[in-house]
Image (spheres, helix red, strand yellow):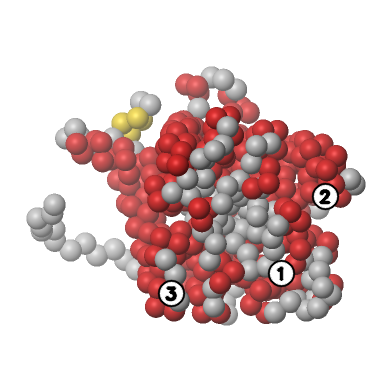
């Protein structure tokens, strides 16, 4: 193979693949399992993919199925997968004071969805710094909540959940109160819930936005268009989603709850659906309306250049802005004094359609393999490709073939479903040949 024969996207896809293989091998070591026995290949592979791709779907409960050694492996995979292995590599280059070549800088730029190659090393250091601040603060606050309950072990719980929340991974150690229960036993704990939500939102906004906020503070007009769209769309989805879930769940999981607890669980459900994967109520018992809304939120996900998955908030914003512009008879949408290019629309539509199409195709495959409720399968597949990690309760019932389908979706969701297809099919660009245009009737 010739030097540099792999494209940037292929290098990123291969990097995650190698990380998954290493994680699988480490999780199969007997010392990684709570019972001291080697974990099955499928369980180890599924867990390695889910943690590397910061998803949270699991075949084995993290707290009761894995030892401390296994949990450390999982959280390291989450940290590397959440920040992107190229971010870690770039930071290592910086610490070692080694010079990065142009190709490495371009791959780093692709890895974090940055549009500028200049200052990419400085940007990688900012990512590490922001991560350390948020995760460190979150770990201290959560440890303060867990130590009174669990003693010295509460410190580990604080660290684990701070990293998992900021990386939008959805892995938890709350199985000590009941396997696969997530945070259902703490649904009314405002302190823990708020800390987790802040970490989830912080990780989901993206490092590009945090850089903008740090540079321009409260000067809204100085923000880049990207940051403005991310902040506005995130606020609409978070509070709009919480309001709808609050009403949808009034006669379901919220029935019998105090008003304050209903507000808290609705807000948490809206936040966590945007790729975080935790839950404070039984997802399987949620109303049909809440499940459908959660699927839609999972499709959107977080923002570009963040630890979150999904098609991204800016992608949805671009599509809706073009839709509204079409209703008004305008060729290009304008927002915050800026117009959006046709190329951006084309990319946004491709990403959305590819994600939805892939999830629906996987749903059909699993329907053929196993007899589950259709809504539950849809919930599972969109959760996987959106790297969310929420489940209606069927993950542990998946057979080998279905589990591999979900694992592939998680991998595609982290690498980027469109990038995944490009990584497999990418060839050298050919000279552009333009065919004559002809009008067709649509609509």
Q: Is residue 356 above or below residue 211?
A: below
Q: Residue at x 24, y 65 (%)?
A: 433
Q: Do we see residue 342 in this rendering?
A: yes
Q: Do we see residue 124 in this rendering?
A: no
The residue that mark 3 highlights is 371
Q: Find residue 177 and report its image quarter.
A: bottom right
Q: Residue at x 82, y 36 (%)?
A: 144
Residue closest to the eye, 413 or 335: 413
Q: Reading the chain from its start, which is encountered first: label 1 or label 3?
A: 1
Q: Residues within 10 Å of mark 1 (few under 14, many from 20)?
A: many
The residue that mark 2 highlights is 156
The residue that mark 1 highlights is 23
Q: What secondary structure is marked by label 1?
A: helix
**Residue 316, x across and y down, in percent:** 38, 44
Q: Residue at x 81, y 78 (%)?
A: 37
Inter-mark Cα distance, 1 to 2: 20 Å
Q: Reading the chain from its start, which is encountered first: label 1 or label 2?
A: 1
Q: What secondary structure is marked by label 3?
A: loop
Inter-mark Cα distance, 1 to 3: 31 Å
Q: Residues within 10 Å of mark 3 (few under 14, many from 20)?
A: few
Q: Is residue 425 above or below residue 329?
A: below
Q: Residues within 10 Å of mark 2 (few under 14, many from 20)?
A: some
Most extreme residue toward the right is 152
**Residue 422, x across and y down, in percent:** 44, 66
């Amino acid at each position: 193979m010739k030097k540099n024969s792999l494209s940037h996207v292929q290098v990123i896809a291969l990097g995650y693949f190698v990380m998954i293989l290493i994680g699988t091998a480490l999780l199969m070591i007997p010392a990684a399992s709570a019972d001291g026995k080697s974990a099955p290949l499928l369980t180890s592979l599924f867990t390695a993919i889910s943690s590397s791709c910061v998803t949270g779907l699991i075949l084995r409960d993290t707290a009761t199925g894995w030892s401390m050694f296994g949990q450390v492996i999982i959280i390291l995979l989450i940290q590397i997968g959440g920040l992107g292995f190229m971010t870690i590599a770039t930071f290592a280059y910086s610490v070692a004071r080694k010079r990065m070549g142009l190709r490495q800088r371009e791959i780093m730029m692709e890895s974090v969805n940055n549009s500028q190659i200049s200052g990419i090393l400085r940007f990688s250091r900012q990512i590490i710094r922001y991560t350390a601040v948020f995760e460190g603060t979150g770990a201290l606050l959560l440890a303060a909540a867990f130590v009174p309950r669990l003693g010295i072990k509460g410190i580990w719980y604080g660290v684990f959940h701070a990293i998992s929340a900021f990386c939008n991974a959805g892995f938890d150690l709350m199985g000590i109160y009941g396997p696969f229960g997530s945070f259902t036993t703490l649904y009314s704990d405002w302190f823990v819930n708020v800390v987790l939500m802040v970490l989830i939102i912080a990780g989901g906004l993206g490092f590009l936005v945090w850089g903008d906020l740090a540079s321009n503070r409260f000067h809204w007009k100085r923000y880049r268009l990207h940051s403005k769209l991310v902040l506005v769309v995130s606020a609409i989805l978070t509070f709009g989603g919480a309001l709808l879930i609050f009403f949808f769940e009034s006669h379901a999981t919220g029935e019998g709850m105090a008003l304050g607890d209903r507000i808290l669980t609705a807000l948490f459900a809206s936040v966590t659906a945007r790729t975080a994967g935790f839950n404070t109520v039984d997802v399987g018992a949620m109303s049909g309306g809440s499940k459908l809304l959660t699927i839609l939120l999972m499709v959107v996900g977080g923002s570009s250049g963040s630890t979150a998955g999904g098609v991204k908030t800016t992608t949805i914003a671009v599509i809706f802005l073009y839709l509204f512009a079409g209703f008004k008879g305008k060729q290009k949408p304008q927002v915050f004094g800026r117009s959006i290019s046709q190329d951006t629309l084309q990319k946004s539509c491709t990403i959305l359609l590819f994600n939805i199409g892939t999830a629906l195709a996987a749903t059909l495959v699993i329907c053929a393999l196993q007899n589950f409720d259709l809504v539950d399968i849809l919930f599972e597949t969109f959760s996987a490709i959106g790297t969310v990690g929420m489940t209606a309760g069927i993950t542990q019932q998946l057979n080998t073939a279905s589990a591999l389908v979900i694992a592939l979706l998680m991998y595609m969701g982290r690498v980027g479903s469109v990038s995944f297809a490009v990584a497999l099919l990418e060839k050298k660009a050919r000279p552009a040949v333009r065919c004559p245009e002809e009008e067709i009737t649509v609509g």
